Amino acid sequence: MASGHSTALPPQDALPLELDLARLIVSALSLEVEPASIAPEAPLFGEGLGLDSIDALELALAISKTFGVQLRSDDERNHQIFASLRSLAAHIEKHRTR
């Protein structure tokens, strides 16, 4: 099975912050996936990227260091915030320090 270049190209509708965040996720969690291959609307947990609660904690720390946004483990909205790359990027954009 030949692999094409399409996985290395960013999704057409990906926003710059989403691509930055995808790079951070891959780097912080040492994932073996191209950041640009993470679809903005794909789930980060379960059948999507397959992240788990430990990954979420590591990711929250990396987001805090990189974007200045605090993500609390007891936030009842975490399921929504971490639902996809797009929802996480939207949360960061709304709350990040300038």
Image (cartoon, rainbow, N blue to C red):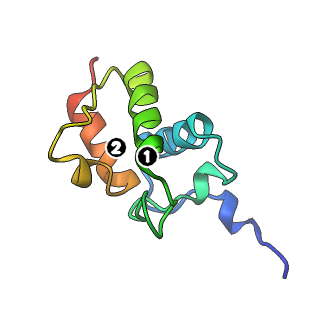
In the image, residue 3 above or below residue 67: below
Please give the name of the residue rendered at 50% of the width and 38% of the height, measured from the top-left corner.
Answer: 20
For residue 69, the mark is none
In the image, residue 11 above or below residue 59: below
Relative placement, left or right, of 59 versus 97 is right
Q: Measured from the top left, where is residue 89 in percent x and y?
A: 34, 43
Contact (Cβ within 8 Å) of mark 1 with mark 2: yes
The quarter holding residue 2 reads: bottom right
Quadrant position of the N terminus in the picture: bottom right
Of 90 and 79, nearer the camera is 79
**Amino acid beneath label 1:** Glu
Relative placement, left or right, of 27 versus 13 is right
In the image, residue 91 above or below residue 71: below
Q: Residue furthest left?
A: 76
Of 79 and 85, nearer the camera is 79
Helix, strand or loop at label 1? It is helix
Question: Dot 1 corresponds to which residue?
Answer: 18
Relative placement, left or right, of 8 versus 89 is right
How far is mark 1 from mark 2, CA to CA?
Answer: 6 Å
Please give the name of the residue rendered at 17% of the width and 39% of the height, measured from the top-left corner.
Answer: 75
Quadrant position of the C terminus in the picture: top left
Question: Dot 2 corresponds to which residue?
Answer: 89
Of 61 and 2, nearer the camera is 61
In the image, residue 23 above or below residue 52: above
Circle 2 residues within 10 Å: few <14, some 14–19, many ≥20: many
The quarter holding residue 16 reads: top left
Of 6 and 70, nearer the camera is 70
Please give the name of the residue rendered at 30% of the width and 35% of the height, measured from the top-left corner.
Answer: 92
Please give the name of the residue rendered at 19% of the width and 37% of the height, measured from the top-left corner.
Answer: 74
